[in-house]
Image (spheres, rainbow, N blue to C red):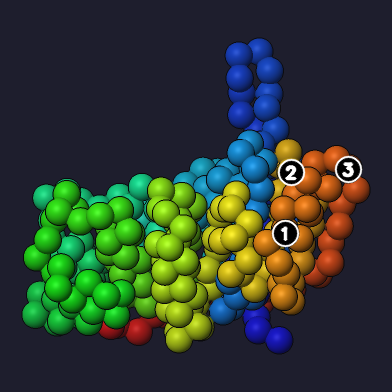
Amino acid sequence: VARAIIEVRNLRKEYPVEDETVVALDRVTLAIPQGQICCIFGESGSGKSTLLNQLAGMEKPTRGGVRIGGVPVSKLNERELAAFRQKHIGFVFQSYNLLPNLTALENVAMPLMFRGVPKERRDRVARSVLKRVGLGHRLGHYPRQMSGGQQQRVGIARAFVTKPEVVFADEPTGNLDSKTKTEVMTMICSFARDFNQTIVLVTHDPQMAAYADRIVTLLDGRIVSDQINQGVTVQSISAQSIQSAQSDQFVQSVQPTAVPSASVPSVQTV
C-alpha cells in the first residue's frame, strides 16, 4: 500500500460574516496516498475550494491540521510555506495565471529559475516539457497569442516541470470546451502516472471527476462520500451528488491511511 503523502485531521474552517460565523469546513479527515489522483468533488459552495486552500497552505484552519509528507503545512509561516511549495508543490489554475509579458518557454522555465537551475539547462527542460504537451511550435508565443486550451497546456507544463510530489489542480478545465477538457485531463493523468505524482483535483464536473482514482464528495463543508473509482461512471457521480444533497447520512468507504512522521523526500533537480 502506498504511503499517504497528504493527511488532513479534523479540519474546521470558519469565516466571520457580519455578526455570524460561517462554517466552510467541518470535521474533514482524509489521507491521500502517494501517486493517487484524488478528486475533491462538489457543487458551488460545498467547501471544495476552501479545502484546497487549506491543503496548499493558502489559508490557516480554525481547528485541525494538514500535513504533507509529515510536514505540518498549516503551522508554517509565509516564508517557510513559500520555500516548501517551491520544492514540493505544483499548481494548475482555472484561469491559467500565466505571466502576460513572458513567452510560453519563459513561463514554464520560471519555477526552475527559482530553484537556481542555469538558464541553458532550464530552457532545455522547459522546451522538452512544452513539446510533450504539444506546444513545441509555440515556445516564443505570449499568452495573448494562444487559445485558452494552449494557455492551459502551458500551465500544466509549468506545474510539472520540476516534478513535484504533489500537484493541486483547481477546476483546471473550467474555461475550456469539451474536446480540450479531455486533452487537458489526459495530459495531467499522463504526467502523474509517469512520475508517481499525487494529484488533488477540485471540480464540480462529473466528467472530469471520472478521471480520478478516488472521488471525495463534499456537501456543506463535510465529506459525504469517499469512493475508490472502480469504473465509476459520470452518471453515477452525478446521481451520488444529488443523493448526498438529499441526505445527511455520511458514507466513508475508504479508510484513511496513516502518514509516517517523516519529511517529504527531496525532489531531484530536473
* Within-10-Å neighbours for mark 1: few <14, some 14–19, many 20+: few
Q: Is residue 5 above or below residue 55?
A: below
Measure the C-alpha gap from mark 3 to mark 1. Answer: 18 Å
- SS state under label 1: helix
Label 3 Cα crowd, 10 Å radius (few <14 / some 14-19 / many 20+): few
Residue at (84, 67) in percent of width and height = 253
Nearer the camera: disc 3 or disc 1: 1
Looking at the rendering, which quadrant does residue 40 occupy?
bottom right
| Rendered residue at 66%/13% (across/down) | 19
| Quadrant of the rendering where the N terminus is positioned | bottom right
Residue 235: mark: 1
Question: Could you tell which of marks 3 and 2 lies nearer the N-terminus?
Answer: 2
Residues at circles 2 and 1 in contact by the CB criterion of under 8 Å? no
Q: How far apart are marks 2 and 1 (CA)?
A: 18 Å
Q: Give the image location of residue 150, x and y in percent.
A: 27, 61
| SS for callout 2 | strand
Amino acid bearing label 3: Ser
Q: Viewer-nearest of labels 2 and 1?
A: 1
Point 87% across, 51% down: residue: 250
Q: What type is the residue that disc 2 sits on?
A: Leu
Query: Mark 3 vs mark 1: which is more N-terminal?
Result: 1
Q: Which residue is drawn at 61% across and 69% down?
A: 212
The residue at which mark 3 appears reads as 247
Residue 27 locus on image (x, y percent): 77, 47
Q: Between residues 86 and 170, which one lies in front from this camera angle?
A: 170
Q: Can residue 70 be seen in this view?
A: no
Q: In this view, does 91 lie to the left or right of 59?
A: left
> Which residue is under mark 2?
219
Q: Which of marks 2 and 1 is nearer the N terminus?
A: 2
Q: Nearer the viewer, residue 86 or 226?
A: 226
